[in-house]
Image: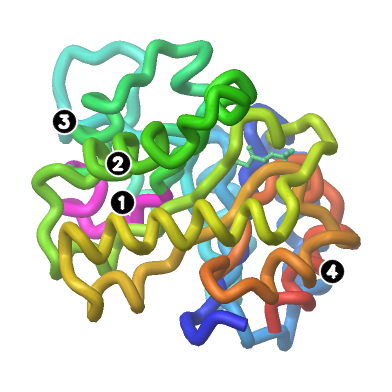
Amino acid sequence: MSKRRMVIAGNWKMNMTPSQAKNFASELYEAVKGKRGCDIVVCVPAIDIPAVVKVCAGTAIKVGAQNVHFKNSGAYTGEISPEMLIDAGVKYVVIGHSERRQYFGETDETVNLRTKAAVAAGLTAIVCVGETLTEREQGITAEVVAKQVKLALSGISADQMKKVIIAYEPVWAIGTGKTATAEQADEVCGLIRSVVASLYGKVVSRSTVIQYGGSMNAGNAAELLAMENIDGGLIGGASLKTDAFTAIVTAAQ
Ligand code: 13P
């Protein structure tokens, strides 16, 4: 098992109204109480943030957002700034999720801008990278992922890397029930670690948290989390069920 502290983060995506979120967060808090062996994060829809921050105040559960703009204010209708998230009690933010890259025009360049702004504001950025099925079949996974990592981290200092988590999420494994094998996931997480080492040196790469995401569930979490280079999970579907998410948190203890 990895020597780094695990981070188990739920990505609720576009699920849970504010009232549902409030109830679910209370349930979750009861379920994971006392499980102090990993960091627990829930990345919730922006409108749910106040309710979830209130429920999770003083508990081990930290609250994350699912996106952030790179300016602190201005004429950007519909966007939410790093300053706003910080003021609302948010500690983490998912950046560059494949669904944002696929459906909302997110590029490596905007991922980089958001990452720099998030980290500068004091948020921990969970930067998502991962290849599509076609790219895996073409044998270019390593190139694709290395490029995404390098571009996302451009301009981030070695010291700021303490505020960066990289989530390896193969696009073909997201929401498909098709998990990468533990070996496949560990191989790419190891590659990401070597890219971080090439940019910042071994000390930084050894302490960087690299998560796996893509159909992680109660049944496969223990095997994935046992791998040397996998330091946690970014969990979609299974993070919406108390039992499944708690089981993953337990596997990370
Ligand atoms: P699933 O766990 O539903 O496959 O989603 C993974 C994901 O995209 C987390 O960000």
Instruction: Identify the residue at the far front of this view.
Output: 139
Q: Is residue 118 magenta?
A: yes
- Amino acid type at mark 2: Met
| Ligand 1 within 8 angstroms of badge 1 C-beta | no
Is any atom of residue 57 visible in this view?
no
Question: Does residue 79 appear left or right of residue 170 in this picture?
Answer: left
- Kindly identify which residue carries mark 4: 247
Q: Please tell me which of labels 1 and 3 falls first in the chain.
A: 3
- Amino acid type at mark 3: Lys
Q: Which residues are magenta?
A: 117-126
Q: Are marks 2 and 1 in contact (CB under 8 Å)?
A: yes
Tag 3's secondary structure? loop
Q: Nearer the viewer, mark 4 or mark 1?
A: 4
**Which corner quadrant holds the N terminus?**
bottom right
Q: In the drawing, what numbered circle is on residue 87?
A: 1
Q: Are marks 4 and 1 in contact (CB under 8 Å)?
A: no
Q: Is residue 114 above or below residue 29?
A: above
- Kindly identify which residue carries mark 2: 84
State which quadrant residue 215 falls in: top right
Q: Please tell me which of labels 2 and 4 falls first in the chain.
A: 2
Q: Nearer the viewer, residue 115 or 91?
A: 115
Q: Nearer the viewer, mark 2 or mark 4?
A: 4
Q: Position of residue 224 (x, y in %)?
A: 71, 64
Q: Residue at x 42, y 56 (%)?
A: 191
- Amino acid type at mark 1: Asp
Instruction: Give neighbour class at mark 3: few <14, some 14-19, many 20+ (Cα, 10 Å).
Output: some
Q: Please tell me which of labels 3 and 2 falls first in the chain.
A: 3
Q: Residue at x 57, y 25 (%)?
A: 132
